Each structure stands twice: as structure tokens, then as C-alpha cells.
Image (cartoon, coloured by chain):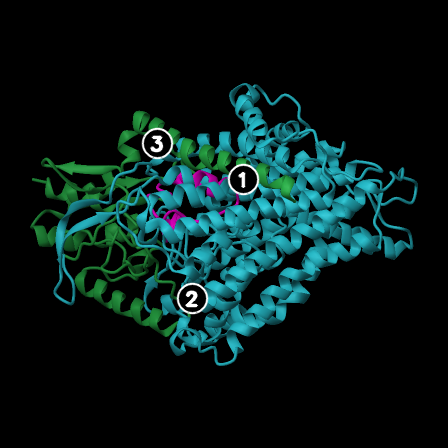
């Protein structure tokens, strides 16, 4: 037992230094050298100031912007405290939430008569989902075009340009980055 | 399910199967002390200096008792180190957000969680832990707890292959080599791949950005800025996936876009969950001198996980009938994945969320890329049941395969009873002592899970912490609430670490009860496993005869799968009936 003490402590300290200090520092060093933008949060600059990150969604509720998915963080899209709703599918609170959101989305988009795309009325896992499905973006085109006084055609075209397909045609799901799309809207003349 | 869903599933399981052989071959060389593809030129000096300073003779052979004491002592030191770090983090450096010390119960729970390779998250990464705690506490344990599991597996394999000896190897040799030659190089590669996709890796304080559209909340507070949590995430995420740890850098784990930003990062992280556990099957085959034995075990794992994965994906794709009734479109078509999207991320959709849920619970990983609490009832039953099977279908690195070998021993025993012969496995007679120990390994987790759940739900009023009952910790009423508690104890009692996260666990009762469950499930299984290793090593080799049951044929694979499913079903179906199954019937009835 006592003969095991020295190996235990030395091995623990040595492996702590290797895996807890040297390893993260090495990865940080290489990452900052090769992928500085990604390693620091993929920040977006517009007009000389940082307006967000490619990867983190933002809250939009103005009619002239595309809206993101509902967020369970407090306040919405709080990137310092991520969380999902963790509400189950038979929870009355969840059904109420979906009903309220569906009503609000339908009211805001009166030209749409079909059912609402599911991602537009369900909260994402992180509360920070930067994307919506192409269906959810197309659903909002008429509203955004009207609020901006732009031809719906041009807005639809912008959405189409912003659809990211599956990686290699296989992995993941088609999606639209809401912040990128809204930034492009603002620069639409 | 769409044709793309099938393609993504097939691609994943095919790539995993293809990587098992090369990595498994390499790991066998690591444990047999053979040249490791030049890796010893990079880390050999480090390995030798550790042995020298620690006064270790790595050729010194240990008996099973000494091996067990070394494992326990080493894990105990790790446990106390994490506890101390969390309690002192307020006055330690690398704490840009100035987080205070963790409470004693949270520090206990988190230390137990990481020492046991469970990585249950009672903490919320970005709001409770400093960068130093994440690195020096959690990342270190991610490595060494995984390496401890791999070491015990290797000791058991030596027990199976050696004849009439009292020793099963040297723990320090197995531990240090697992860490330096396997986990560390793989982690460096995976971490850099993840950074290339956008996973963050820096030491900056949280960034504040000006949002494009300022908002006004319902209570009148203005939102003009957004604070982005940052930190050295990629290095921790790589090892938390590879080492079947699962404890996230952020609260929502790999659902967080900084932790898992793209379909490629998702594929890499998914692959990392099962990679080492799958490859160890091949390592096992090499070390016992018959790779068919390893393939048979891997086949048994595939036979269980593949149909369950497809079932979950199908359930989630079907969605929630009540949403459709509210005029919500859950169909899959070219513009959307559809399905039950609550708690899921758009970039992953249904199939990647379902695949992750079954991979992370088949392995004792426990990381998540979608919130299991919001899954459909039967979609959520699968991950819970995969945990309850004992974390042996892949399971934790090392621990999964040694748990699987316990089921193999039981299967061999049952088969032996059927034909009236003394059961043997790989030339070793399986006798009463091995059966007793294997039964302990199989029965302790269900005991912890079911008794723990029972105490939590009926307990003596449970007026721990300010007169709370378990009910006030639940996020969902009814059957789903019961599922939250059952899932929590299943997860802790099998060292998984994922959660139906609606349950409030960061309070004294849950922190303590779940912490004890994790410790019991890890070490009460390791000790009997090592005892079997010691007992098998002492036995003679019995050459196979005409009456020996071949253990690499489909018939035997079916026997093992049958044993696992039978034990898992008989033990847990009553409890599952009260949770997800009732909830499913309610959901159907309401529509």
C-alpha cells in the first residue's frame, strides 16, 4: 500500500501536467496559428464593429427581419447561459407554448395558409441555434418583403442564396443562417 | 424515414466498422509493449521519465489485489484533486468570469462524476466553472478515468490468456501507455479537426457583441448586446468524446454551436464516441490470439445498437401528434427535416440527433447533441434502456468490453447448463467463483438504479433542502416526470452521464445520491472484474474438444445478445412501463 503512494502521486501529477496543461496549451497554440478565426468564435464584423458570431443565433422579432427559432434561454439567445426547454411532448406547458408560437407566427405571416414549419415553433436544444430550415425561411419571405417595401422575388432569391445544403450532399440537414441572411437583407438596396 | 436518413446511418456504422481494425491492431501493440508505429519516438522519453521519477519498474507484475489497490488509490487521488480544485477555484488563476467556489455537494458530485468516467453534469459549464477547473480538473480526469477503464480491461484479457500464474500485468504500464500512446495523440488530432470547424479554443474572457436588432423583453429590459461564452473548449471536447466521458464544456453539451458547429464536427464527434470501444474488440481478438473472438463481440454490439437506432430515428421522425393538430408541419421534405424538433438543432435534424442519442447511451459517453428530455416517449425510451443494459453495448472505453465479457461468461455458463458440460471460454473453465463475480457485476447496477429511483420518488417525504420533494425538482408532470428520475439514476448507476435534463439535480439530495450511485457503479464492478482476471490467470488451459462451444459463431453471438436483452428486459420493463410506455399511450390516446 505505502509502496504504491509514490507511483500514485508522481503519475497523477505527471499526467495532470501532460493532459491538463501541455495538451490544452499545445492545441490552443496550433489552433490560434492555423485557425485563428474559428478558435476565437467565428466573429462577424460589419462596419468596423463586431455584430455577432456565425455560429450563435440572435433574437429577432421585428417584422422586417427573418425570425430565428424559439429559444429557451433567458433572455432569448443568451449565449452566456445555454439551455434547452427540456419540456416533454405530453407536457401541457409545452403544448401551450407551441400553440402560442404557432398563433403568433400565423398572425405575423397572414399570406401563408399552410401549416407552420415545425422548427419555427419548437425551441432548439442549445437555445442558440443559428439556423432555421429553408421551409421556415421561405415561410417568412412575404412578411419581410412587405415590411421592407421590397419585391418578394428579391427576398426569396436572397433566401435561396443563403441555403446551405448537406455537407458532401449527405451529412446534416439543409439550413439557413438567420444572422447572415438578415445582414444581407440590410445591405440589399 | 428518408433515403438520406438511411444513408447517414449506413455511412456512420460503415466508417466505424472500418476503423475498428487498424486502431484495434495499434492498441494491441501498445499493450503488448511492441513498437507503436513510431509513436514511442514522440512519447517514449516521457513514458520512461515518468517511470523513473515515480520509481516504477513497469516490468514488475502485479497480482489482482495489488492491481485493484493501485487503480482505487489512483482514482481516489484524482477524486480529491477535482474536489479541491472546485472548492478553491475562486482564488485560483484562469478564472476570467470570477466564478466562486462550487458548493460542497456540487464539488462532490462533479468529482465523483469525473473520476468514475460518468461525467454527469450537475454543473453548468459556462456559468459555474473556471477555465482552470475545466482543464486541470475535468480534462485530466477525462484522460485518466478513461485510461483506468482501459487498463482494467487489459488486465482481464491477460487473465484470459495467461496460464497458471498469479499476476495480471502492471497498472502503471497500462495506465501511462493508454494515456500517452492512445488517448493523447487521438485527442490532438480530433481537437484540431474540431477547431477547423469552428469549435473554440482560446483563453479570452467572454466576448460582448452588439446585436443586429436590439430587443425589448416583456419586462422592459433592453437587449442591445449579446455575451458570448468562450474558452479552451476543443481540447476538452475531443477527449470527452474519445474517452466516453461526455461532460460538456457548455451546459447544453454538444448541442452548443461552439461545441459542435457543423455536420462535419458532428460526424467526427459521433465517430469518437464509439471509436475506441469498437476498436478494443479487435484489440481483444489480437491479444487472445483469435481475432474472430473480437469480431463476434463487435457483431453482438452491432446487432443490438443498429435496430434501436433506427427505431429511435423513426419515432422522432414521426413527431408528436398534438403538434400536427395545432397545424404544425412535421413532415420531412426537401426544405425541412420535420419530425419532433423540440430540443434539436436545425443543422443536425432528426437522424443525427437520434443517432447521437443511441451512440452516446450505448457507449457510456453521455454527451448529447439534442435534449433527450424532449424526445417522444418511445424515442426517449431507447437511450434510457441502452443505459440500463449495463453500458456494455460498446460501453465505456475498457469498461464496456469488460462488462460485455461478464455477459459472455454468463452466456457460456447458460449454454454449458443446456448441454450438461463444464462451461469454458477461450480455454478457461468457468466455475462457481467466476459466476459469482460476474453476477455481482451484472446485478449491482440495476440494484443501484432501481433502489435509488425508489428512494428518490417515495423517500421519507424527502424534505431535504428547504422542504422540497422530488416533485418540485421535476420539469415535467406525470409519467414523464417519473422518467426524469429513472433516467437520472440509470445514468449515474451505469456511469453514463446523459440526462433527461429537466430534473433539477444541482441540489444536495440529488448531488449526494447520484454521486454515490456513480461511485458504486464504477468501483464495485471494477473489483469483481479484476478478481475474475486473477482467478482466470491461475487456471490451466483446457484445449478445445468436440464438445466445446465455439464462441465466434453466429449461434454464440445470438446467445450473448439474448442474455443481454433478457436480463435488461426482465429487470427494467416494469419501471419503463411506469414511465415512457405509459406516456406513449397517453400521447396516442390524446390525439
Distance from Cα at disc 2 to Cα at disc 3: 35 Å
| Mark number, residue A9 | 1
Up/down of B206 relative to B440, above or below: above
Res. B394 in view:
no
Instruction: Please tell me which residue lies in front, A175 or A150.
Output: A175
For discs 2 and 3, the disc positioned in front in the rendered view: 3
Label 2 with label 3: CB-CB less than 8 Å: no
Magenta-colored span: B237-266
Chain given the colour cyan: B
Is B334 contained in the magenta span?
A: no
Q: Residue at x 21, y 66 (%)?
A: A104
Residue B291 position in % (x across, y down): 72, 33
Disc 1: host chain: A
Label 3 with label 1: CB-CB less than 8 Å: no
Q: N-terminal of the two: label 3 or label 1?
A: 1
Instruction: Please tell me which residue lies in front, B92 or B549.
Output: B92
Q: Quadrant of residue B191?
A: top left
Chain given the colour green: A
Q: Residues within 10 Å of mark 2 (few under 14, many from 20)?
A: many
Residue B176 position in % (x across, y down): 57, 33
Amino acid at each position: 500500500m505505502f509502496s504504491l503512494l509514490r507511483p500514485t502521486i508522481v503519475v497523477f501529477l505527471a499526467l495532470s501536467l501532460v493532459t491538463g496543461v501541455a495538451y490544452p496549451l499545445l492545441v490552443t497554440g496550433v489552433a490560434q496559428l492555423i485557425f485563428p478565426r474559428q478558435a476565437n468564435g467565428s466573429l462577424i464584423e460589419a462596419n468596423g464593429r463586431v455584430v455577432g458570431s456565425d455560429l450563435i443565433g440572435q433574437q429577432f422579432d421585428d417584422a422586417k427581419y427573418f425570425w430565428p427559432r424559439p429559444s429557451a434561454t433567458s433572455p432569448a439567445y443568451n449565449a452566456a447561459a445555454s439551455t434547452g426547454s427540456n419540456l416533454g411532448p405530453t407536457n401541457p406547458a409545452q403544448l401551450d407554448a407551441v400553440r402560442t408560437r404557432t398563433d403568433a407566427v400565423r398572425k405575423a405571416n397572414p399570406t401563408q395558409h399552410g401549416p407552420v414549419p415545425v422548427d419555427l415553433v419548437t425551441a432548439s436544444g442549445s437555445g442558440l441555434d443559428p439556423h432555421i430550415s429553408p421551409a421556415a425561411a421561405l415561410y417568412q419571405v412575404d412578411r419581410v418583403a412587405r415590411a421592407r417595401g421590397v419585391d418578394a422575388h428579391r427576398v426569396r432569391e436572397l433566401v435561396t442564396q443563403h441555403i446551405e445544403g448537406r455537407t458532401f450532399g449527405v451529412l446534416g440537414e439543409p439550413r439557413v443562417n438567420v444572422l447572415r441572411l438578415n445582414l444581407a437583407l440590410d445591405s440589399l438596396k | 424515414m428518408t433515403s438520406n436518413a438511411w444513408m447517414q446511418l449506413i455511412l456512420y456504422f460503415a466508417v466505424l466498422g472500418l476503423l475498428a481494425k487498424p486502431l484495434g491492431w495499434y492498441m494491441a501493440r501498445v499493450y503488448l509493449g511492441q513498437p507503436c508505429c513510431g509513436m514511442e519516438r514522440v512519447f517514449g522519453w516521457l513514458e520512461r521519465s515518468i517511470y523513473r521519477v515515480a520509481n516504477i519498474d513497469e516490468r514488475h507484475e502485479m497480482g489482482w489485489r495489488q492491481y485493484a489497490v493501485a487503480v482505487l488509490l489512483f482514482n481516489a487521488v484524482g477524486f480529491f484533486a477535482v474536489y479541491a480544485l472546485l472548492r478553491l477555484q475562486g482564488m485560483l488563476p484562469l478564472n476570467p468570469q470570477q466564478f466562486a467556489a462550487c458548493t460542497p455537494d456540487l464539488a462532490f458530485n462533479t468529482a465523483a462524476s469525473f473520476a468514475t468516467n460518468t461525467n454527469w453534469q450537475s454543473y453548468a459549464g459556462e456559468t459555474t466553472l473556471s477555465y482552470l477547473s475545466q482543464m486541470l480538473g475535468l480534462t485530466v480526469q477525462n484522460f485518466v478515468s478513461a485510461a483506468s477503464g482501459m487498463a482494467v480491461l487489459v488486465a482481464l484479457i491477460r487473465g484470459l490468456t495467461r496460464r497458471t500464474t498469479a499476476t495480471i500485468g502492471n497498472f502503471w504500464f497500462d495506465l501511462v501507455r493508454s494515456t500517452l500512446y492512445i488517448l493523447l495523440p487521438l485527442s490532438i488530432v480530433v481537437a484540431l479537426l474540431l477547431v477547423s470547424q469552428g469549435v473554440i479554443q482560446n483563453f479570452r474572457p467572454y466576448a460582448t457583441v452588439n446585436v443586429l436588432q436590439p430587443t425589448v423583453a416583456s419586462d422592459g429590459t433592453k437587449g442591445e448586446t449579446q455575451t458570448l461564452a468562450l474558452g479552451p473548449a476543443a481540447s476538452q471536447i475531443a477527449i470527452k468524446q474519445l474517452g466516453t466521458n461526455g461532460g460538456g464544456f457548455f451546459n447544453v453539451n454538444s448541442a452548443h454551436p461552439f461545441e459542435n458547429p457543423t455536420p462535419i464536427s458532428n460526424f467526427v464527434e459521433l465517430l469518437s464516441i464509439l471509436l475506441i470501444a469498437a476498436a478494443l474488440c479487435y484489440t481483444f481478438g489480437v491479444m487472445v490470439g483469435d481475432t474472430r473472438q473480437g469480431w463476434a463481440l463487435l457483431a453482438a454490439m452491432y446487432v443490438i445498437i443498429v435496430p434501436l437506432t433506427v427505431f429511435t430515428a423513426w419515432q422522432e421522425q414521426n413527431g408528436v401528434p398534438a403538434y400536427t393538430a395545432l397545424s404544425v408541419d412535421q413532415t420531412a421534405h426537401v426544405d425541412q427535416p420535420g419530425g419532433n424538433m423540440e430540443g434539436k438543432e436545425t443543422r443536425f435534424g432528426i437522424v443525427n440527433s437520434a443517432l447521437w442519442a443511441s451512440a452516446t447511451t450505448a457507449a457510456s459517453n453521455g454527451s448529447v447533441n439534442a435534449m433527450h428530455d424532449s424526445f417522444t416517449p418511445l424515442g426517449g425510451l431507447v437511450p434510457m434502456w441502452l443505459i440500463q443494459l449495463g453500458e456494455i453495448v460498446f460501453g465505456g472505453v475498457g469498461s464496456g468490453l469488460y462488462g460485455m465479457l461478464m455477459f459472455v461468461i454468463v452466456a457460456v455458463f447458460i449454454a454449458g447448463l443446456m448441454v450438461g458440460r463444464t462451461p469454458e471460454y477461450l480455454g478457461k473453465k468457468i466455475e462457481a467463483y467466476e459466476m459469482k463475480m460476474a453476477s455481482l457485476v451484472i446485478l449491482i447496477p440495476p440494484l443501484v438504479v432501481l433502489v435509488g429511483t425508489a428512494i428518490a420518488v417515495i423517500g421519507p417525504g424527502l424534505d431535504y433542502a428547504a422542504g422540497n420533494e422530488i416533485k418540485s425538482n421535476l420539469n415535467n408532470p406525470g409519467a414523464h416526470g417519473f422518467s426524469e428520475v429513472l433516467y437520472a439514476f440509470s445514468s449515474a448507476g451505469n456511469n453514463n452521464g446523459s440526462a433527461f435534463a429537466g430534473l433539477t439535480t444541482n441540489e444536495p439530495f440529488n448531488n449526494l445520491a447520484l454521486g454515490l450511485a456513480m461511485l458504486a457503479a464504477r468501483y464495485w464492478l471494477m473489483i469483481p472484474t479484476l478478481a475474475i482476471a486473477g482467478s482466470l490467470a491461475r487456471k490451466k488451459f483446457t484445449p478445445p474438444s468436440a464438445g466445446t462451444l465455439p464462441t465466434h459463431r453466429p449461434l454464440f453471438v445470438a446467445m450473448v445478445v439474448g442474455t443481454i436483452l433478457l436480463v435488461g428486459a426482465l429487470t427494467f420493463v416494469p419501471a419503463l412501463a411506469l414511465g415512457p410506455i405509459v406516456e406513449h399511450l397517453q400521447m396516442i390516446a390524446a390525439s
